Image: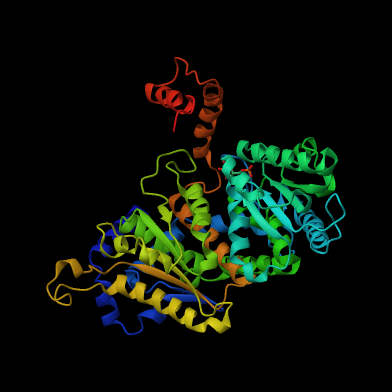
C-alpha cells in the first residue's frame, strides 16, 4: 500500500495544469464524470488523470473498501470502540430485505416505528391529535442538538416547497437567547414540542426542554404537558420521567449514529412539515444511493469517486480544507450539516487498532450558499495563498418556474466560478497588472441534479454519508464514534459550580480563573 501512496505522490508531481488537461483532451468531461439518473458528479475540474484515478481505485481496493462496506450493510459491529453495528441504511431499506444484528432481523421493529411515526405525524397534520384545548397545532418546536438538530433543520429548510403541515422551528443552543427568540412570537396553546435526544442526557437539550416545559406549564397548566410534548430517543424510559406519554415517545436504536439519524424518528419534524409520503420519497432516494454504492463498479460509483477526489486533495495535494458551495438557497444549512457528518466522523488521529495514523485525515469543511459567498469569501478562494478544493451543488430547475431568469443567473454564476477557479488569469491576460492575476489551477467538483426534491435530497445526503465512509475506510479510522467531544463536556460539568458561585478554586489555571471572575462579576456596564 505504501507503494501506492508513493506512486500517487510522484504522479501528482507530473500532473499537468487543469488548463492543459482540458486542452489535451476534448472528452475530459465525459471521461471524468459519473451519474445516477439525473444526479451527476463532474470531477473533470480536478487534477485527476487516468493514471492517478487508476492508482486511487487500487488504493480503495488495497484498503478493502468493498469488504468494509459489505460489513456495514451486513450489520457487523464495525463501530468497534462502542461495539455497535452501523445501520442507518436499514432505516431507508424500503426493499424491506432482512437486516440482522446479533442474529435478529431489525426490519420488523423499524417498520413498526415508522408506522407509529407516520400515524402520529398524519394525525397532527390533520388536526386529529390536538393541543390541550382541542384545537390543532400550528407550530412545532424541535429541541435537540448535533445530530438531533442539524439533520432535521437542514432537511426542513431544503424541502420548504413541500411544506403543507405545521410550521417547524428548531432550538439547539443552550444559550437562552435561542429558546427565548423562538417562543416569543409563538402561542403556547398552539405549539407542540418535540424533545429529540438519542441519549436524553445531553445537557443543552435537557435544559432547553425544561425551560420549554415551564413555558407550557405557566401558560396552560401542568396537565397540558402530556398533550404538548413528544419525545424521540433511544432511552425511552427517560421521556416518561419528563411527563411525556409513551404513545408520543418514538424510539430508535444504538446502531444509528447521531449524525446519521435523520432517517430515524429524529426525522419527525420533517414528517410533520412535509407529510409521510414525501418523507418516504426522501428515504427512497437514500435507498437508491445505498444500492448504487453497493453494486456500481468503483470506477462509476459516486460515493467512491467523490471520496477519491477527497483523498487526492487531502493526502496527495495536501489541501487542508474543502468548501461546500450549494448554489441552492434552500441548502443553506447543508454545509453546517456536513460539518458534523464529516468532521465528527473523520476528525480522528488514531486508526481502529489505536495506532497513530500516518496520513492526514478529515479536512476542515465549511461553506455558504452561492451566490452569496461570491460577495464575501470567494476572494480568498481565487487569489488567496491556500488552495481550497470546492464542491459546487446546483439544480437544473428551481421550484419557481416563473423566475427562470433568476435560475439562469444562478447556473451561470456557479459555472463561471468553477471555470474561473480552473482557468485563472495570466499576467498577460491581466495586461501586466499583478493584482488582477488569478493563479487558477484550483480544483472543484460539481454535483448537478434536476431539482431539489425529497428523493434527490435523500440521494445527496446518502452520497455524502458514504463518501465519508469510504475516506474513513481508506484511512483505517472509525468514522462512527466521537470521543473527541467528551473532554469539553466533562470540563464544563466540573466548571458549572465554579461559574455559579463565581469562586474559582485552586485547581483552575490562571486564565480560566481570571475569566470566571471577569464573567461572573456583577454587571457594571452602563
Ligand atoms: O441526540 P443526543 O444524545 O442529545 O446527542 C446530540 C449530539 O451530542 C453529542 O455531543 C455528539 O457529539 C453528537 O454526535 C450528538 O448528535
* Residue drawn 51% across the image and 67% down it: 329
Vertical placement of residue 360 versus 499, above or below: below
Specify whether residue 105 is in view: no
User: Residue 205: where, in percent of width, then height?
Assistant: 64, 41
Residue 309 is left or right of residue 478, and the answer is: left
Which quadrant of the figure has residue 233?
top right
Which quadrant of the figure has residue 16?
bottom left
User: Residue 133: where, in percent of width, then height?
Assistant: 86, 51
Front-most of 464 and 457?
457
Residue 395 is left or right of residue 167, and the answer is: left
User: Residue 444: where, in percent of width, then height?
Assistant: 37, 68
Figure quarter occupied by ligand 1: top right
Instruction: State the residue lying farthest toward the top.
Output: 506
Quarter placement of the N terminus: bottom left
What is the count of numbered marks? Answer: 0
Quarter placement of the C terminus: top left
Front-most of 380 and 5?
380
User: Residue 186: where, in percent of width, then height?
Assistant: 69, 52
Front-most of 272 and 376?
376
* Residue drawn 15% across the image and 72% down it: 427
Residue 376 is left or right of residue 263, and the answer is: left
Residue 26 is left or right of residue 239, and the answer is: left
* Residue drawn 73% across the image and 51% down it: 187
Q: What's the image's color scheme?
A: rainbow
Specify whether residue 126 is in view: yes
Instruction: State the residue lying farthest toward the left.
Output: 432
Vertical placement of residue 447 versus 244, above or below: below
Which quadrant of the figure has residue 386?
bottom left
Vertical placement of residue 180 versus 13, above or below: above
* Residue drawn 29% across the image and 65% down it: 382
Amino acid at each position: 500500500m505504501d507503494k501506492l501512496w508513493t506512486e500517487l505522490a510522484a504522479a501528482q508531481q507530473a500532473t499537468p495544469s487543469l488548463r492543459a488537461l482540458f486542452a489535451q483532451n476534448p472528452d475530459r468531461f465525459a471521461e471524468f464524470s459519473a451519474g445516477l439518473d439525473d444526479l451527476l458528479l463532474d470531477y473533470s475540474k480536478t487534477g485527476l488523470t487516468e493514471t492517478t484515478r487508476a492508482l486511487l481505485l487500487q488504493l480503495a481496493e488495497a484498503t478493502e473498501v468493498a469488504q468494509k462496506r459489505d460489513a456495514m450493510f451486513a450489520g457487523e459491529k464495525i463501530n468497534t470502540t462502542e461495539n455497535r453495528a452501523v445501520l442507518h441504511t436499514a432505516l431507508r431499506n424500503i426493499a424491506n430485505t432482512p437486516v440482522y444484528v446479533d442474529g435478529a432481523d431489525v426490519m420488523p421493529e423499524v417498520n413498526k416505528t415508522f408506522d407509529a411515526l407516520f400515524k402520529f405525524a398524519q394525525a397532527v397534520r390533520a388536526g386529529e391529535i390536538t393541543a390541550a384545548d382541542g384545537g390543532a397545532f400550528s407550530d412545532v418546536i424541535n429541541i435537540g442538538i448535533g445530530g438531533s438538530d442539524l439533520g432535521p433543520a437542514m432537511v426542513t429548510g431544503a424541502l420548504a416547497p413541500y411544506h403543507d403541515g405545521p410550521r417547524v422551528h428548531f432550538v439547539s443552543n443552550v444559550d437562552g437567547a435561542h429558546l427565548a427568540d423562538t417562543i416569543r412570537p409563538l402561542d403556547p396553546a398552539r405549539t407542540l414540542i418535540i424533545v429529540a435526544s438519542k441519549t436524553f442526557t445531553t445537557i443543552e437539550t435537557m435544559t432547553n426542554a425544561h425551560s420549554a416545559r415551564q413555558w407550557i406549564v405557566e401558560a396552560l397548566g401542568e396537565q397540558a404537558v402530556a398533550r404538548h410534548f413528544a419525545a424521540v430517543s433511544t432511552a425511552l424510559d427517560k421521556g416518561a420521567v419528563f411527563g411525556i406519554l409513551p404513545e408520543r415517545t418514538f424510539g430508535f436504536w444504538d446502531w444509528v449514529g447521531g449524525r446519521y439519524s435523520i432517517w430515524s424518528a429524529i426525522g419527525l419534524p420533517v414528517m410533520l412539515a412535509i407529510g409521510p409520503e414525501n418523507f418516504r420519497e426522501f428515504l427512497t432516494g437514500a435507498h437508491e444511493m445505498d444500492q448504487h454504492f453497493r453494486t456500481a463498479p468503483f470506477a462509476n460509483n459516486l460515493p467512491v469517486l467523490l471520496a477519491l477526489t477527497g483523498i487526492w486533495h487531502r493526502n496527495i495535494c495536501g489541501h487542508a480544507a474543502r468548501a461546500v458551495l450549494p448554489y441552492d438557497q434552500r441548502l443553506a444549512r447543508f454545509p453546517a450539516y456536513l460539518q458534523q457528518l464529516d468532521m465528527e466522523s473523520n476528525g480522528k488521529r488514531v486508526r481502529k487498532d489505536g495506532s497513530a495514523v500516518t496520513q492526514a485525515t478529515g479536512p476542515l469543511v465549511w461553506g455558504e450558499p452561492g451566490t452569496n459567498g461570491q460577495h464575501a469569501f470567494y476572494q480568498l478562494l481565487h487569489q488567496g495563498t491556500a488552495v481550497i478544493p470546492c464542491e459546487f451543488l446546483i439544480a437544473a430547475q428551481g421550484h419557481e418556474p416563473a423566475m427562470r431568469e433568476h435560475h439562469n443567473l444562478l447556473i451561470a454564476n456557479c459555472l463561471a466560478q468553477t471555470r474561473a477557479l480552473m482557468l485563472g488569469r495570466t499576467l498577460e491576460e491581466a495586461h501586466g497588472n499583478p493584482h488582477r492575476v488569478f493563479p487558477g489551477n484550483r480544483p472543484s467538483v460539481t454535483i448537478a441534479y434536476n431539482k431539489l426534491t425529497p428523493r434527490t435530497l435523500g440521494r445527496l445526503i446518502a452520497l455524502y454519508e458514504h463518501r465519508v465512509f469510504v475516506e474513513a475506510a481508506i484511512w483505517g479510522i472509525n468514522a462512527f464514534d466521537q470521543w473527541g467531544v467528551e473532554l469539553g463536556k466533562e470540563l464544563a460539568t466540573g466548571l458549572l459550580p465554579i461559574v455559579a458561585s463565581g469562586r474559582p478554586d485552586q485547581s483552575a489555571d490562571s486564565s480560566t480563573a481570571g475569566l470566571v471572575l471577569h464573567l461572573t462579576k456583577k454587571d457594571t456596564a452602563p
